[in-house]
Amino acid sequence: MLLQYLDDKSQIKDAVRMAEIGLTSAWTLDDFKVAIAKYISSPPMSDTNLKFVFDELLERAREKEEKEAKKRKRLADEFYELLHASKEITASSKWEDCKSLFGDRQGASFAFIDLELVTRLQGPLESDN
């Protein structure tokens, strides 16, 4: 039983790699079955093993998404603090006009952040009052 589970798990992980599946927390077991179906060889594996492996992969996907969300939150907080500390930037500033103030490394890290979004989430900058 355990040996069969380990074989099925290996086959499923190989299928995920071959199909280049980007599993997210929004996936269902049925979505997963369809995505890997043509990569799974005969005989068909047990639904129980498939469910166990899917649950494992789904948990990893959730953890990865949470880690990415925390990273984005941390970067947004750091960006907000930099905006707050700068007297040269106002809420009406455009990213293209300001990115040189952050340097290449920070600019690349913060490129995904929308100034308007930061302002809405964190409140108006003090220099704009």
Image (cartoon, rainbow, N blue to C red):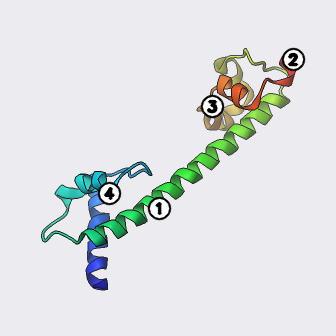
The quarter of the picture where the C terminus appears is: top right
Q: Amino acid at mark 1?
A: Glu
On the image, which quarter does residue 121 sit in? top right
Residue highlighted by disc 4 = 29
Q: CA distance from mark 4 to mark 2?
A: 52 Å
Q: Earlier in the sequence, mark 4 or mark 1?
A: 4
List x then y, in percent, for residue 83. Answer: 78, 29
Q: Residue furthest left?
A: 42
Mark 4 nearby-residue class (10 Å; few <14, some 14–19, many ≥20)? some
User: What is the secondary structure assignment of the residue under circle 1?
Assistant: helix
Query: Where in the figure is residue 106, as x and y percent of width and height?
Result: 68, 37
Q: Which mark is residue 129?
A: 2
Q: Are marks 3 and 1 in contact (CB under 8 Å)?
A: no
Q: CA distance from mark 2 to mark 3?
A: 22 Å
Looking at the image, is mark 4 or mark 3 earlier in the sequence?
A: 4
User: Where does residue 114 sit, x and y in percent of width and height?
Assistant: 63, 26
Label located before the other in sequence (2 or 3) = 3
- For image coordinates 61% across by 35% down, the residue present is 108
Tag of residue 126: none
* Badge 3 element: loop
How many marks can you see?
4
Reading the image, the residue beneath label 3 is: 113
Q: Residue furthest top?
A: 92
- Return the disc, 3 or 1, that comes first in the chain's sequence: 1
Kindly state the secondary structure of the residue where label 4 is placed: helix
Quick check: 109 above or below 126?
below
